[in-house]
Image (cartoon, rainbow, N blue to C red):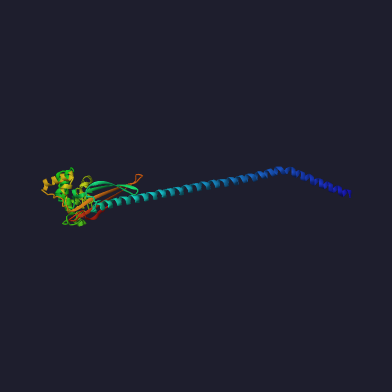
Amino acid sequence: MKLRKRFFLKKEAKTFARLSRTSRRQPGQSFLVKKEQLSLSSRESGFALLIVLWTLVLLALLTAQITGAGRSEAVMVSALRESAQLQQAADGAVFETLWHMLDGGGDYWAPAEGVREMREPGAVVTVTIEDERGKLDVNQVPPQLLAGLFMALGSDADTAQALGSAIGDWRSQASPGDQQDNVPAEYRMDGRAWGPPGQEIERPDELLLVRGMTPALYQAALPYLTVALEQGPWVQYAGPMVQNAIARAKRIGGIAVDSADPRGPVVLRVTAVANGPDGTRFVRRALLRLDGTLSGPAWKYRILFWE
C-alpha cells in the first residue's frame, strides 16, 4: 500500500514538474502568437483605412462634379432666360415703334429717322430708325446712278461704269440665267461657275457675286443701298454721299431724280438694342415698309426683313 502511494506521489511530482516546465515556456510562445495576431490585425486595419480614404476621395470628387454641373446648368438656364427676356424686350420695342407710327392719335410718331429710348421689363432698349428713302434701290436705279455712287466712293470712272452695267445685267430679265451652259465668257474668264440669274436681287450681299464687285467696295457702298424701296431715291431724304452720286450720274447719263410722293411708301430700317442689367444685350434688326393712304397718318405695313 505504501509502495503504491509512493508511486502515485512520484508520478504526480513528475507531472507537476512537466507542467511547470511547460508553463515556464508558455509566456514566450504566447507573446509570439499575440505578436503575429497583432501584426495581421494592423495590416487588415491599414487596408480598411485605405479603402475608406479612397472612398471618401471618390465621394468628394463625385460631389464636386455634381455641384459643378448643377452650377453650370443654373448659369446656362439663367443666361437663356435673360436672353429670352432681352429678345422679347427688343421685339416689343420694334412693334411699339410701329404702333406709334400707325397711331392716328396723340401718340403718333412721324415715320422719320431718329433715336428713341424705351424702358421695357428688365431692359433698356435703344431704337434707331433709319429712313431708306434716300438710298439707292439696286433693283430700280439706272446703272449710271450706281456708277456715280462707286465713283463717289473712290472708284475710277471706267471701273465704276463697268460695275454699274454688270449690276444692270445681273438683275435684267433679259439675261439667260446662271445655268452652266449660259455663263457669260467674262465670268468664265474670272473662274466663276455662275452668271447673271436674270432676276431681281433679293439680298444686298448678292452683289458680291457680280463680276467686278470687291468686298471693300461692297462694304463701303452698303450703307447707301437697299432692295426694298422699289423706287426713288428721293432727293430730300438723300444724304451727302447719295447727293454726290446723283450729281455724278447726271454728268454721266443726264438722269433725273424725282421728289418724294407723300402718298408713296415709307421704308424704315429699325434697329432695337436691348441692354440688360449685367451688360448683356440683344439686337433686333427689322426692315419695315409702310404704304400711305390718301389722308391722315393711317398706314398699312409689311415686315420685309427680320433678323
Query: Percent position (x, y) of residue 174?
Result: 15, 57
Q: Nearer the viewer, residue 60 or 111?
A: 111
Query: Percent position (x, y) of residue 45?
Result: 59, 46
Q: Nearer the viewer, residue 57 or 96?
A: 96
Q: Determine if residue 159 is in view.
A: no
Image mark count: 0
Q: Nearer the viewer, residue 263 or 19?
A: 263
Q: Quadrant of residue 42?
A: top right
Q: Residue furthest front?
A: 106
Query: Percent position (x, y) of residue 3?
Result: 88, 48
Q: Determine if residue 45 is in view.
A: yes
Query: Percent position (x, y) of residue 170?
Result: 18, 53
Q: Residue at x 76, y 43 (%)?
A: 21
Residue 246 placement, left or right of 11: left
Q: Residue at x 43, y 48 (%)?
A: 71
Residue 281 placement, left or right of 265: right
Q: Nearer the viewer, residue 57 or 79?
A: 79
